[in-house]
Amino acid sequence: MGADHPSTLRTHYNWAICWATLGFPGVARIEMEKVVAARRRVLGADHHETAQAVRMLADLTRLPPAGWRFGGRGRRRNVPTNRRERRQRGNSPGSGPT
C-alpha cells in the first residue's frame, strides 16, 4: 500500500478526527486538507469518501475546538486519567466481585 492507497487515506482521515478529538483542530484541519486533496486526485471529486472528507473539513473549520472533545458539548473525558482513577479505586474493568 502506498501513500495514495484508499486504505491509507482512510487512516489519515481517522487521524484527523483523532487530532480534533484530542483538542488539536489546527492539526486536524491540515491533515483533512491533505486527505481531501488526495481523495480528489485518487478517487475523484464525485466519490462518496471524497464528499465525506469535504464535509468533515467544513465541520472542522466551522465548529469550535471544544465541540471536538471527548463526549462533545462541554463534557470532557480524559481517558488515561479515568483509567488511572479506576485503578486507584480498584474498579478496573474485569475486576468484579470475587
Image (cartoon, rainbow, N blue to C red):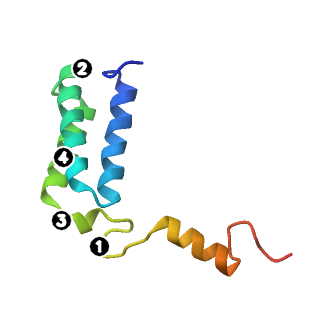
Going from N to C along the chain, the mark reached first, 3 or 2, is 2
Q: Which residue is mark 1?
A: 73
Residue drawn at 21 percent across, 34 percent down: 34
Q: Nearer the viewer, mark 1 or mark 3?
A: 3
Residue drawn at 32 percent across, 68 percent down: 72
Which amino acid does the dot numbered 2 rest on? Val
Q: Nearer the viewer, residue 50 or 68?
A: 68
Q: Which residue is mark 3?
A: 64
Residue drawn at 20 percent across, 47 percent down: 29
How far from the left and from the top, in percent, is residue 53? Answer: 23, 40
Q: Secondary structure at mark 1?
A: loop
10 Å neighbourhood of mark 3: few (<14), some, or many (≥20)? few
10 Å neighbourhood of mark 1: few (<14), some, or many (≥20)? few
84 shown above or below 52: below
Q: Which residue is mark 2?
A: 42
Gap in angstroms between the C-alphas marked 1 and 3: 10 Å
Which amino acid does the dot numbered 4 rest on? Leu
Gap in angstroms between the C-alphas marked 2 and 4: 18 Å
Quarter of the image where one finds residue 2: top left
State yes or no: discs 4 and 3 in contact (Cβ < 8 Å). no
State yes or no: discs 1 and 3 in contact (Cβ < 8 Å). no
Going from N to C along the chain, the mark reached first, 4 or 3, is 4
Q: Is residue 44 left or right of residue 6?
A: left
Quarter of the image where one finds residue 48: top left
10 Å neighbourhood of mark 2: few (<14), some, or many (≥20)? some
Q: Which residue is mark 4?
A: 57
Going from N to C along the chain, the mark reached first, 1 or 4, is 4
State yes or no: discs 1 and 4 in contact (Cβ < 8 Å). no
Gap in angstroms between the C-alphas marked 1 and 4: 19 Å
